[in-house]
Image (cartoon, rainbow, N blue to C red):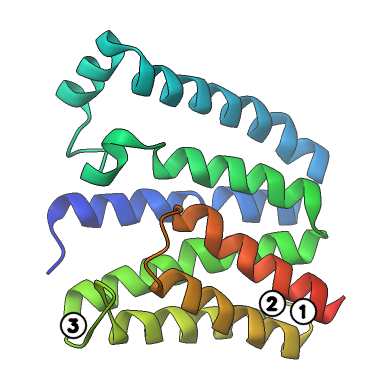
């Protein structure tokens, strides 16, 4: 079952839709004007938290359990990975691919967590089959609904991102999932 803290994290995760929606409604330059400084500031805070004992202690007291997950105590925060990967996706990939990859990360990852922890029964690599199927189905829906996406490449991207999200890779999925989806759409669909 999802705890109150996990539900709050997922709601905050959905708030990050502001990046792909903002990019759809404005320009790359407009979004990057805000995204790059924000990413660099969060990275600086995150690195200071990791390597400055006083800030680490303050973060542990004030944020651990509320914002930080146990696994993030000794790595970068998921939000840092998210902002950095968002900026890189906007810089490296065409607009449609960047937006769809971020939508997959935000919406499909949330679906996977809600379904997997809510009703998941069949464990796979510390996650659930049901959560992974929810991820895949929601990612598939995104690539089939979003305009100007190569449907074949999008379907492969949904499958690839679902596999990457499921596997016990030791790199944050806020980085691996959107880059897997973007790379597949870019190299397969052109």
Instruction: State yes or no: discs 1 and 2 in contact (Cβ < 8 Å).
Output: yes
Instruction: Give the CA separation, mark 2 to mark 3.
Output: 28 Å
Please say whether residue 148 is visible from this viewpoint. no
Position in image of residue 150 (x %, y %): 79, 84
Closer to the camera in the image, 172 or 113: 172
Q: Which residue is mark 3?
A: 119
Q: Which element carries disc 2, helix, strand or loop?
A: loop
Sequence-wise, the earlier of marks 3 and 1 is 3
Image quadrant in which the N terminus is located: bottom left
Q: Which element carries disc 3, helix, strand or loop?
A: helix
Please say whether residue 64 is visible from this viewpoint. yes
Sequence-wise, the earlier of marks 2 and 3 is 3
Q: Which residue is mark 1?
A: 149
Query: Seen in the image, is 126 located left or right of residue 17?
Result: left
Q: Which residue is mark 2?
A: 146
Instruction: State yes or no: discs 2 and 3 in contact (Cβ < 8 Å).
Output: no
Q: Which element carries disc 1, helix, strand or loop?
A: loop
Q: Residue at x 64, y 55 (%)?
A: 20
Above or below residue 53? Residue 132 is: below
> Which quarter of the figure has residue 130?
bottom left
Image quadrant in which the C terminus is located: bottom right
Query: Seen in the image, is 121 located left or right of residue 170?
Result: left
Badge number at residue 133: none
Position in image of residue 101 (x %, y %): 63, 65
């Amino acid at each position: 079952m999802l705890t109150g803290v996990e539900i709050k994290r997922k709601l905050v995760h959905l708030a990050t839709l502001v990046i792909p929606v903002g990019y759809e409604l404005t320009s790359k330059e407009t979004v990057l004007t805000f995204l790059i400084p924000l990413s660099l500031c969060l990275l600086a805070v995150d690195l200071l938290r990791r390597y400055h004992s006083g800030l680490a202690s303050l973060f542990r007291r004030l944020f651990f359990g509320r914002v930080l997950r146990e696994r993030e105590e000794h790595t970068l925060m998921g939000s840092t990975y998210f902002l950095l990967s968002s900026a890189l996706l906007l810089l490296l990939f065409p607009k449609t691919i960047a937006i769809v990859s971020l939508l997959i990360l935000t919406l499909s990852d949330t679906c996977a967590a809600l379904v997997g922890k809510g009703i998941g029964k069949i464990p796979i690599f510390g996650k659930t089959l049901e959560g992974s199927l929810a991820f895949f189905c929601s990612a598939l829906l995104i690539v089939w609904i979003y305009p100007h996406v190569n449907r074949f490449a999008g379907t492969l991207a949904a499958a690839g991102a679902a596999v990457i999200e499921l596997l016990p890779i030791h790199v944050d999925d806020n980085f691996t999932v959107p880059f897997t989806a973007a790379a597949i759409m870019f190299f397969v669909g052109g």
